[in-house]
Image: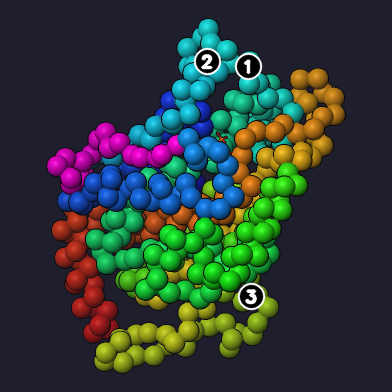
Amino acid sequence: MLRWSMLRYLSAGESHGPALTVILDGVPAGLELVAADHIDPWLRRRQGGYGRGRRQVIETDAASLLGGVRAGRTTGAPLAMQIENRDWRNWTQIMDPAPGGEPRKRALSAARPGHADLAGGIKYGHKDLRDVLERASARETASRVAAGAVALRLLSSAGVDGCARVVSMAGLPCDGGMDWDRLDALDDSPLRCFDSEAEAAIIERIDEAKRTGDTLGGVVEARFRGLPIGLGSHVQWDRKLDGRLAQAAMSIQAIKAVEIGDGWYGATALGSQVHDAIYRSEEEGYHRTTNRSGGLEAGITTGEELVVRAAMKPIATLMKPLPTVDVVSHEPADAARERSDTTAVPAASIVVLAMCALVVADALLEKFGADSVREITERLEAHGAWTASF
Ligand code: EPS
């Protein structure tokens, strides 16, 4: 069991049901929050990226705030949000919660390898695997992004910026180096990366994968700057921030690996090449000239940029399907084909940022108070003075 969180996120809703519902409990009072300004732009970013399927043409995701906000400010009460599924109108008979519809019309029994279909069907006793896939679908990540956008807003009120980008796709690097002054370039890039030269070759790979009915994955990065030293803790396993971030990022659909800082590379190098020497000056206080630890030591923020990378496997729905078994006939079959994306790696970068923002905001509330933004601001100032004189 995990520790009790200050910020608790829950969601409900199916991919082709009426709407996605989000509850975010623990948002402090006094946070200026306007859905159109602070949440919807992140929802739009999640919908973007080269290689997406037709669903994103149908949807224009927007969050309706249904609780916890008054006159553009949070009250401290649980935040309730709803994101409408526009596609619902094409699925009313198939997804009707009431009996009497036509649920069999889009029944699915040829389990897709790599998706939740087979294990979920056996676990919950569904022979119509649509009862699994509707909730397992990455459509659910819109809920995560709405909640994460609130966390990003809260972090921004504490002087913390967040950024999401793609650093490689289909095995081709497109890192281009981090540049906080060019965040707009990420929004303009079809792959959400800083390397426009690598982009063309990757787009060719995506086109090729689409042509051949295949899919492809990649590596995304979430990054935060302006963090105070001391979020998280070394004293108990479930309070370590690295562990909490890894859990949040790994819980995202199709994410199969997470690293912090130099992560996998660190296992191959010498200690002197992996750890970050410590310096102190009057102007900069404690600081490092390298950040191989990715801003975390022993599960505590070091004050350097927090860098989390996550590997997304190729999407499991293939138009050139793999062999499988039909769970009704028990005969060999080709895996079911559902409308899907060729790749959703740029979107996944936004989802990873959102989930990491929830974890970092949770740790911020833990250390600096969770009732009001004013309280957090005062305590942050006191902490800044303490750190400077330490
Ligand atoms: C997605 C919505 C889904 C898929 C995709 C992501 O919508 P639909 O099933 O109606 O096309 O496009 O989901 C998956 C790739 C998946 O494996 O579930 C979205 O909104 O992000």
- For marks 2 and 3, the one nearer the N-term is 2
Whole-angstrom CA distance, mark 2 to mark 3, is 51 Å
> Is residue 300 visible in this depiction of the protein?
no
Given residues 18 and 25, the one toward you in this image is 18
**Magenta residues?**
59-76
Residue at the location (31% across, 66% down)? 160
Report the residue marked by disc 3: 265
Foreground pick, 372 / 18: 18
Q: Quadrant of the C terminus?
A: bottom left
Looking at numbered disc 1 in the image, what kind of residue is underneath it? Lys
Give the Cα separation between the discs numbered 3 and 1: 49 Å
Q: Position of residue 61 (x, y in %)?
A: 40, 40
Which sits in the foreground, 304 or 271?
304
Q: In this figure, which residue is indicated by the disc labeled 1?
A: 105
Q: Is residue 75 magenta?
A: yes
Mark 1 Cα-neighbour bin, 10 Å: few <14, some 14–19, many ≥20: few
What is the x, y in percent for residue 137? Answer: 56, 37
- Above-or-below relation of 44 to 184: above
Camera-nearest label, 3 or 1 = 1
Quadrant of the image occupied by residue 174? bottom right
Residue 261 lies in the magenta stretch: no
Dots 2, 1 in contact, CB < 8 A: yes
Q: Are marks 2 and 3 in contact (CB under 8 Å)?
A: no
Q: Evaluate whether residue 74 shows in this view.
A: yes
Residue situated furthest top in the rendering: 100
